[in-house]
């Protein structure tokens, strides 16, 4: 080595980077100490890794209800609870029902609250259909080859849709006007809804621990037990109350006094009905965490450039996000 090059190395540093797999090391040469020194060490990411990092950062910065389709069960619970609360407040303000635990249906029996009750519950039924369908598609995507889970998933979809139909019937056929139709809608809503919750709890058990956490299963199991106890209490007391031993005008009765016959059975029945409704709310709230990990897309397959009856020509298909961004 010449004296000129030695002098240049004495007062300057040389940099060199070595790449081993995904690891990037940066070295510098110190001419005075005649040695190489590790300057820094960092990971080298591919474009795919950078995209994942960006997505994770965006996910972290989003609010919880912006992640996936988690807003669906949230909107369902909030909207349905608002329908009950607004109808209850209106009925109490106008003295149409007693403040102490009326039937949920009684708060939507007389105008104007019955109009509000019916309209809001119809929207709640649509939100419930969307939530149940998304849950069905999620389980189907996670278990494409498990025959037992596929059958349970389809059964849950049918039960959930029947429950939604019953909710719409309850909303549009008041107890005092169409009692039989109203009771059939209530049986569909609470009966099929309880079975839906039971099926989904079984699915959660079948999918743990690989896909579902044990904590989610135990929470749903407790909610199902809560719903079952409420349903048993409501069914038993309402059967005794409407057996005919306490009068024939109970169906039309909106105001109850502690001195009335069957008052205790009435209070137990109404408390069990409200309790059962809250168990439904609690169960759908457990979907929020699951729905944060799913998004849906709608795909339009075009067979021509116009809507006229012409010979088909190949065109590009379009894929559009449905309700949510991709995660």
Image (tube, helix red, strand yellow):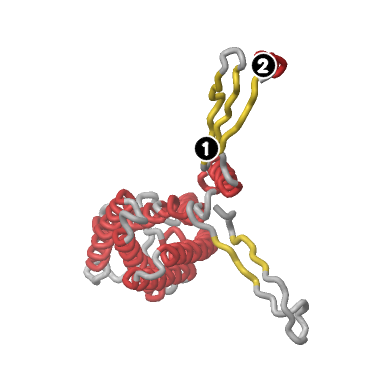
Residue identified by numbered label 1:
23
Neighbourhood count class around disc 2 (C-alpha, 10 Å): few under 14, some 14–19, many 20 upward: few
Q: Are marks 2 and 1 in contact (CB under 8 Å)?
A: no
Q: Is residue 61 above or below residue 116?
A: above
Tell me the element at label 2.
helix
Say which element carries label 1.
strand
Between tags 2 and 1, which lies in front?
2
- How far from the left and from the top, in percent, is residue 77? 46, 54
The answer to whether residue 114 is visible is: no
Among the 4 quarters of the image, the one containing residue 228: bottom left
215 to the left or right of 67: left
Residue 107 position, x and y percent, is: 44, 58
Direction from residue 57 to residue 133 in the image, left or right: left
Nearer to us in this view, 300 or 37:
37
Task: Point out which mark residue 100 bears.
Answer: none
Q: Label 2 to label 1, Cα distance in Å?
A: 31 Å
Q: How far from the left and from the top, in percent, is residue 40?
A: 55, 27
- In primary-sequence order, the first of circles 2 and 1 is 2
| 171 with respect to 46 (left or right) | left
Residue at image point 59% right, 54% down:
325
Residue marked by disc 2: 6
Outermost residue to the front = 2
The quadrant in which the N terminus is found is top right
Pick whichever, 267 or 260, lies toward us.
267
Question: Residue 100: x and y, percent?
Answer: 35, 50
Residue at (54% x, 52% y) in the render? 327
Q: Nearer the viewer, residue 154 or 269?
A: 154
Looking at the image, can residue 147 be seen? yes
- Residue 255, compared with residue 249, is above or below; it is above
């Amino acid at each position: 080595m010449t004296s000129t090059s030695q002098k240049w190395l004495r007062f300057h540093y040389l940099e060199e980077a070595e790449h081993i797999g995904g690891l990037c090391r940066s070295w510098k040469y110190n001419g005075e100490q005649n040695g190489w020194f590790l300057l820094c060490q960092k990971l080298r990411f591919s474009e795919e890794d950078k995209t994942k990092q960006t997505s994770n950062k965006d996910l972290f910065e989003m609010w919880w209800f912006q992640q996936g389709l988690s807003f669906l069960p949230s909107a369902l619970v909030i909207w349905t609870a608002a329908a009950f609360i607004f109808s209850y407040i209106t009925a109490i303000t106008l003295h149409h029902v007693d403040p102490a635990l009326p039937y949920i249906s009684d708060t939507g029996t007389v105008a104007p609250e019955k109009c509000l009750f019916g309209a809001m519950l119809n929207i709640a039924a649509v939100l419930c259909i969307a939530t149940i369908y998304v849950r069905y598609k999620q389980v189907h995507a996670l278990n494409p080859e498990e025959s037992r889970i596929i059958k349970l998933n389809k059964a849950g979809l049918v039960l959930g849709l029947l429950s939604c139909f019953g909710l719409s019937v309850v909303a549009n056929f008041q107890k005092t006007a169409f009692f039989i139709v109203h009771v059939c809608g209530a049986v569909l809503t609470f009966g099929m809804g309880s079975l839906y919750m039971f099926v989904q709890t079984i699915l959660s058990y079948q999918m743990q621990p690989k896909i579902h956490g044990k904590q989610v299963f135990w929470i749903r199991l407790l909610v199902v037990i809560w719903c079952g106890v409420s349903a048993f209490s409501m069914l038993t007391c309402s059967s005794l109350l409407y057996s005919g031993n306490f009068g024939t005008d109970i169906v039309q009765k909106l105001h109850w006094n502690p001195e009335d016959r069957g008052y205790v059975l009435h209070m137990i029945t109404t408390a069990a009905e409200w309790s059962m409704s809250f168990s439904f709310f609690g169960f759908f709230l457990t979907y929020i965490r699951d729905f944060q990990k799913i998004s849906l897309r709608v795909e339009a397959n075009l067979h021509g450039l116009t809507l006229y009856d012409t010979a088909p020509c190949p065109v590009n298909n379009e894929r559009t996000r449905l309700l949510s961004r991709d995660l």
